[in-house]
Image (cartoon, grey):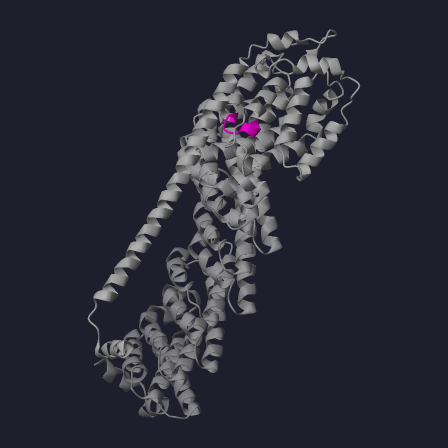
Amino acid sequence: MATTEALSVIPASVLRNLSDKLYEKRKNAALELEGIVKQLAVAGDHDKVTAVIHLLTQEYTYSPQANHRKGGLIGLAAVTVGLTSEAAQHLEQIVPPVLNSFSDQDSRVRYYACEALYNIAKVVRGDFIVFFNQIFDALCKLSADSDANVQSAAHLLDRLVKDIVTESDQFSIEEFIPLLRERMNVLNPYVRQFLVGWITVLDSVPDIDMLGFLPDFLDGLFNMLSDNSHEIRQQADSALSEFLQEIKNSPSVDYGRMAEILVQRAGSQDEFTRLTAVTWINEFVKLGGEQLVPYYADILGAILPCISDKEEKIRVVARETNEELRGIETDPAEGFDVGAILSIAQRQLSSEWEATRIEALHWMSTLLNRHRSEVLVFLNDILDSLLKALSDPSDEVVLLVLEVHACIAEDPQHFRQLVVFLIHNFQLDHSLLEKRGALIIRQLCFLLDAERVYRELSTILEGESDFDFASIMVQALNLILLTSSELSDLRDLLKQSLVNADGKNLFLSLYASWCHSPMAIISLCLLAQAYQHASSVIHSLVEEDINVKFLVQLDKLIHLLETPTFAYLRLQLLEPGRYIWLLKALYGLLMLLPQQSAAFKVLRTRLKTVPSYSFKEERFRRTSGIPYSQFNYGGGGSQISEDGDLNENLHDMHSGINFDLKLQQLQQIQKQHHLHSKSQTQSRFVSTSWMKEVQIAEESKRAASELNRPPSRSSGRGLGQLQL
């Protein structure tokens, strides 16, 4: 019925020319159709207008013939132009078939669809906003059309639609954003340009709040920063820069959702994307305030790796952001998650980059200073990582780790735990003790009280069942004690062991564990000026004590005697009559050294410089007649009186140290060492013998099997030939 009604008002020639293959004929037919519709509109006969639109849609735009489809599109545009101000009421019929033609397989049809919609839009302007999402979707696809002419036509239409949207008050940004978000992950460069163009245009409209919806398409914009096209990267960067400026000037911004996106982008493989993300994070940390507190851990996790970025610009911004973040003091009650921050810092301790590890440790230190009780709750979670970090190849990292350890160890229980863990790690990894032992012990003594550290170490090592490790550890501690500037106060205290109660207590505290190494005991006695006991220890040494390890330690001690640490001892040699036990101890050490060794020559040269005028033969005879066992083990400052009798200084006699008992303690522990050593040697011998026996048994079995094997024919002939 509708078709008959339309045919009654449109001449057959017009309908025929509308589908002609020649453009001019189609154009002329459209102009005639425009005039007809204009008359119908003036007459108010909208039913016939509807019939005409229906005819054009069904018989032309949906026709299998391309020329018919072209004619239908130009005809619909002509109808709209003819209707002018009254076209709005017919848009529901006119626009859908045109939009449908955008996906036509014929590029010319798609071109005419763009042209038709352009003409329709010019007439109806804001009235077609109701179709905006469908039009946008169609334009998005056409922007990447394979035909250059179609692309060009789509661009013209796109510009017109943008103009209409910017002046319309009917545009709904809320309905548009889901469509935009869906398209933002498209990789096609033409589509990306199209999208950025729309974002920029809409953001320029004062009445449209694009900033409020920025989290919905921010990730897509960041995606475009790594596009192969320089133009697209530039457009995306420009859009992002504009939004960042708006954020700075806006009183209300959803920092949280965007922070999550930025954290991800800060780890991008693309350098420019990383820089932009870190720059945004930097601004967010300055502007975000309380909104960002729940995201601090995520932000820190993104920033710490960037501190070691290969690109200097990124490193600079990341460091600034890190300092800004650490400068913000927040309370756990306000949502600041100490555990999450601590976990991030712990994870970054295993970073391959030194700068990142250093900053992670600074964070641990900061958290300990500000939220000590909260950090200690997670101590068991981070302690293993902190202990492993003591093996870090960077000295700066190790020093910072020790600062963190020292801060934790302010509590006695944690101090004990630290020292136990430290010794355990040294025991498991001897290379750690060898390479970093001195650095670790010295720094702990600097950060904590040196006497406290050494007393605790000694207490733990005293009961150490692994004698080999105990000996190595004591030798290492002894060497540090004798050489490190951080332990000068401790050495000064030990020098007063025979006259000062604190010095005596320290001497006794160290003595028990130092018994694991005779050379360490001798060194300790020389330091404490207990020269008589040093001489006693030297004379008590048995064959098992004087091995290669002992001689190596002795060699080190002899060279240490020439250092400033033992300057007092060398000066005491100016009074050999007063310090006869010192002289005797040194001569005892000389007798233990191989004569061809460098240490022997050094010590012998030193002893040759001892003044001879203080010795008188009669005094030597009278003194040397006293059996060694009758000498009082009172200490070091023994001297000979004017009548030649050997007397102990008064303070030595009342030092309160039972040196006889100490010597027995040393001999008892060394006896255990000897038994342990013999047991190990025997074990190795038994193991080797058993392996040899097993090997012999296996060889015997193989030989027996060879003899018992039946001879083959060839082997039989061979035997027969041998017998002949």
Residue 52 location, quadrant: bottom left
Point out the image quarter for the C terminus: bottom left
Residue in the foreground of this view, choosing between 23 and 697: 697
Residue in the foreground of this view, choosing between 84 and 327: 327
Residue 399 in percent (x, y) is at 57, 37
Residue 100 location, quadrant: bottom left
Q: How many labels does the image show?
A: 0
Which residue is the extreme one toward the front? 724
The answer to whether 399 is drawn above or below residue 102 in the figure is above
Residue 49 location, quadrant: bottom left
The answer to whether 565 is drawn above or below residue 579 in the figure is below
The verdict on residue 331 being magenta is no
The verdict on residue 519 being magenta is yes
Q: Image check: 221 left or right of 82? A: right
Residue shown at 70%/23% (left/top)? 569
Residue in the foreground of this view, choosing between 192 and 322: 322
Residue 506 in percent (x, y) is at 56, 18
Q: Image check: 238 left or right of 590? A: left
Residue 438 in percent (x, y) is at 58, 36
Quick check: can you spot residue 344? yes
Residue in the foreground of this view, choosing between 152 and 414: 414
Residue 84 in percent (x, y) is at 41, 73
The answer to whether 378 is drawn above or below residue 507 in the figure is below
Q: What stretch is highlighted in magenta?
A: 514-520
Residue shown at 60%/22% (left/top)? 534
